Amino acid sequence: MMPSLLIDNPSPAQSPGALPRRRASFGARVARGAAFLAAAALVIPAGPARAQGQGRQPSIIRDAEIEALMRDYTRPIFKVAGLQQQNIQVVLVGSDSFNAFVADGRRIFINTGALKQSKVPNEIIGVLAHETGHIAGGHLANMRQQLESAQTAAIVAMLLAAGGVAAGAASGANMGGAAAGAIMAPQEVIRRTLLSYQRGQEASADQAAVKYLTATKQSAKGMLTTFERFQNDQIFLSQRIDPYVLSHPMATERIALLSELARKSPYFDAKDSPALQARHDMMRAKLIGFTQTPDAVDRAYGRADTSLPARYARAISAYRFGSIPDAIRQIDALIAEQPNNPYFHEIKGQALLEAGRAREAVPPLRRAVALSDGNPLIRMLLGQALVANDDKSTMEEAVRELTFSLQREPSSPAGWRYLAMAYGRKGDIPNADLASAQAAFMSGDFRLARTLGSRARDGFKLGTPGWLKADDIVNYKPPVDPNARRKSAGP
């Protein structure tokens, strides 16, 4: 079942699946370089809350309401950066740390912890503007070139150092521990050079962010707030950290430079609009309601708090952890206050669907689809409710809703599985097999995908669209894992 706030551990084969392992740019906690520098990475302690996700693969969060807000945050930034035609996505990562990073030229990853901790939209907009600076500046491609050059230089340096050690040994000199030092010293120089280059990229992205914010008549004050948060993380280490082994400038230095730039802007004291602040508050309430325990929700919003965000968080918490009838009562009160809010209708439909009341879930989800101008994630949820309703008369509508959503969200295994069920209940077995093959493919189970694809291909007429899609799956050659190849080759 795909809820409004979908938490998914994606397959490594999928995009935007497993997060590429590269340096985390904004607020990073680990200085990363080339493989031979990995042992020198410096981790800045992040506190108990941030340690919760250690050892677990990050989860991708999907939510129509939050993603719409991120698009509205980034649209003016992308426009002034000249990236409005690049189809850049903001991807939500299920982690409590305050962090964001870019992994390629198409996606900005931002942790839900950053969204929950931010008090005003400007803090998140500043983070997104900084990451946009990395994309617009081509920093990822430049860093790859630097890493390639560094790896070559490291190999040469190690060979030269090893040659010197060998010469010393041949002359009878007692090299002792100096041998290791002679080999490691060039790598240390290269490592520091790389990190210095990376710090330069961070400074460049900071400057670009201030430029974008000024061009869109927004303040950079939120970025200062964020850096002050980082400064608190670093303060107890400030006396023993070598700033040249950090991939980012020290927080105090960064705040000073950014403050000087930001205060020159005529929009430094500009405030977020009340409407945008209200949406930000609702986004935070949704995340708190979904991800925190009822006790934590009560701590975040006292019982005396009757604001709309507080009631939103409580209603979500009630359906997640409490009584469905009580949750529906609370959600209905929200709908009565804002009858044209699509996300209130969506959450009602989701609550009913997850409670096994699929028939009752369909009307609010249809209303949510209409009010959201056909949001594909909500249409997918409606399609799932129609399938779960198990009424053959609604299977055609289910196929229509799921097909539409999957055209825009093709990497959803759950969507393909529900489409397969819809086709199966219609008696359309070839399309059911094809959808099942797509689900397996998107989950990274290529062996099962080929089996199902072959069966689907046999059910279609040669050369038809269904036959061609099935044939593509059958003939797909997944990338070879070099580690697996080495293991199979033996010692």
Image: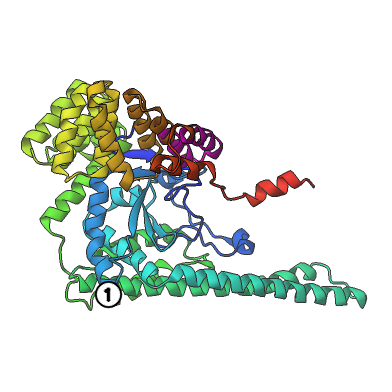
Of residues 241 and 454, the one drawn nearer to the viewer in this rendering: 454
Disc 1 crowd rating (10 Å Cα; few below 14, some 14-19, many 20+) is many
Residue 374 location, quadrant: top left
Front residue of 22 and 426:
426
**Residue 257 lies in quadrant:** bottom left
Work out whether residue 460 or residue 440 is closer to the camera in this orientation and state it.
Answer: 460
Residue 458 lies, with reference to residue 54, above or below; the image says: above
- Measured as percent of width and height from the top left, residue 196 is found at 51, 74
Residue placed most toward the observer, 46 or 280: 280
The x and y percentages for residue 174 are 88, 72
Residue visible at 38% across and 60% down in the picture? 106
Residue drawn at point x = 21 percent, y = 68 percent? 219
| Side of 331 relative to 299 (left or right) | left
Q: Which quadrant holds residue 344? A: top left
How many badges with numbers are in the image? 1
Q: Is residue 284 visible?
A: no
Which residue, given by chain and number where applicable, does mark 1 sit on?
Answer: 211
Task: State the predominant SS element of the stretch in magenta.
Answer: helix
Residue 137 visible here: yes
Secondary structure of the residue carrying numbered label 1: helix
Mark 1 is on which residue type?
Answer: Lys
Left or right placement of residue 164 versus residue 440 in this view: right
Q: Position of residue 186 (x, y in %)?
A: 68, 74
Q: Indicate yes or no whether the magenta region holds residue 442.
A: yes
What residue range appears in magenta? Answer: 435-457
Q: Is residue 178 left or right of residue 215?
A: right
258 w.r.t. 74: above or below:
below
Identified at 33% across, 75% down, the residue is: 207
Residue 85, magenta (yes or no) = no
**Quarter occupied by the N terminus:** top left
Write the residue at 33% across / 55% down. 90
